[in-house]
Image (spheres, rainbow, N blue to C red):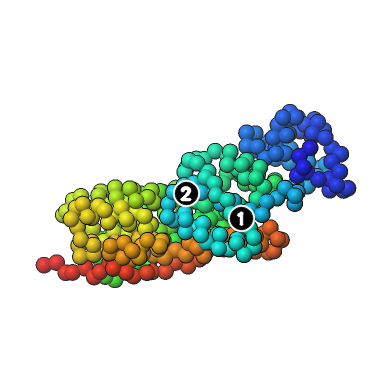
Amino acid sequence: MAPAEQRKSNGENKVKLADIAKQTGYSLATVSKALNGKADISEAARQAIDKALKDNGYIRRVSLSRKQRTIEVVFRDFETIWALEVLRGIITEAKPHNINVMVAESGDRQHPDSSWVEGIIDRQPIGAILVFSNLTDKERSMFQSHGIPFVVFDPSGNPALDDLSVQADNWMGGVIATRHLLELGHKRIGIITGPDEMLCSRARLDGYSAALAERNIPTSPELITEGDFTTPGGYEGAMALLEDEQSRPTAIFAGNDLQAMGVYEAARQLKIRIPEDLSVIGFDDIQTAAYMGPALTTVRQPLQDMAATAARMVIDTNEGRKIQKRVVLSTSLVVRDSTRRLKSRD
């Protein structure tokens, strides 16, 4: 019997795997996989086995001797400056509590398999922070049945009602970025979004559209191009928006600062001056934004504060404290040198 299982009445494991298998109609192998958090069984089987365990007086509890003083942070892609900012915030919160931080990658951005959840269960951290994740019911059940709390950081979809989550006010960030450009006299404002399946990307685009609507400016499909939150994606999006000199926008709202870097490179190649010929605004305010040439105007998403909040939620949950399930932090405008008032054209 797995060490995580304890008898509720007297602490002894009197019900055997064979009894659970007989009651549920599943094989011993399937019961064992459910007990040990393996992903390669159906959700129906997992739920039936969990119910049988509870009916027989078992509670799922992680042994304190097995649980590590570690928070595991799961990224889909760790190779970005953005990810380092998130990690820095988590470490800042965890270190005073003598908690280590471990980094893992879940793999495919849109459809990762569940093997990464098995790895976390095997390592037994005090909790996990899942960056840009949109958990399946199966993955959620695997975490819950093994008593490992998790926080979804900047969820890619709408989190479940019981999920702990931390995010920024992306819609308002999109509004204030676009309002800034409108206040400078720009009307043809291009936008390079992030992936459409990501909640933050859709919210920023909706904020952009709402700000235009405030000025009775219709949203033009030709001024919207989808990116992937990377510098090459920003470059490709900017080239698509700027290739026609007659119809190019006078300003571009890049979905994040990494994409804004790509816009800078496209403008350089096309001999377009920033901000004299093209205003550019980003989103995130990563550390390098202030050192771009010219320094990037951007929307500050408090990444390190968000990350520290996520770590604190894991720690508080692990220690039995009551916490707020959903936290949304404010965004703010940081004006630097990459935007300027549009000069009137004769």
Count of marks placed on residues: 2
- Horizontal side of 176 relative to 320 (left or right) equals left
Type of amino acid under label 2 = Phe
Determine whether 97 is above or below 196 in the image. Answer: below
- Horizontal side of 312 relative to 112 (left or right) equals right
Type of amino acid under label 1 = Asn
As helix, strand or loop, the secondary structure at mark 1 comes to strand
Residue 241 seen from this side: no
Viewport quadrant of the N terminus: top right
Q: Say which residue appears at 42% left-offset and 65% top-offset.
A: 300
Residue 63 seen from this side: yes
Q: Give the mark toward the camera: 1 or 2.
A: 1
Label of residue 248 in the image: none
| Residue in front for this viewpoint, 278 or 175 | 278
- Horizontal side of 98 relative to 217 (left or right) equals right
- Horizontal side of 12 relative to 309 (left or right) equals right
Where is mark 2, residue-wise? Answer: 78
Where is mark 1, residue-wise? Answer: 100
Answer few, some or many: residues within 10 Å of disc 1's Cα (few below 14, many 20 plus, some between 14 and 19).
some
**Residue 78 position within the rendered picture, expressed as x and y whole percent measured from the top left:** 47, 49
Q: Say which residue appears at 31% left-offset and 61% top-offset.
A: 292
Determine whether 24 is above or below 204 in the image. Answer: above
User: Which quadrant of the structure image shows residue 96?
Assistant: bottom right
The Cα atoms of the two marked residues, 1 and 2, are separated by 18 Å
**Residue 247 position within the rendered picture, expressed as x and y whole percent measured from the top left:** 19, 54
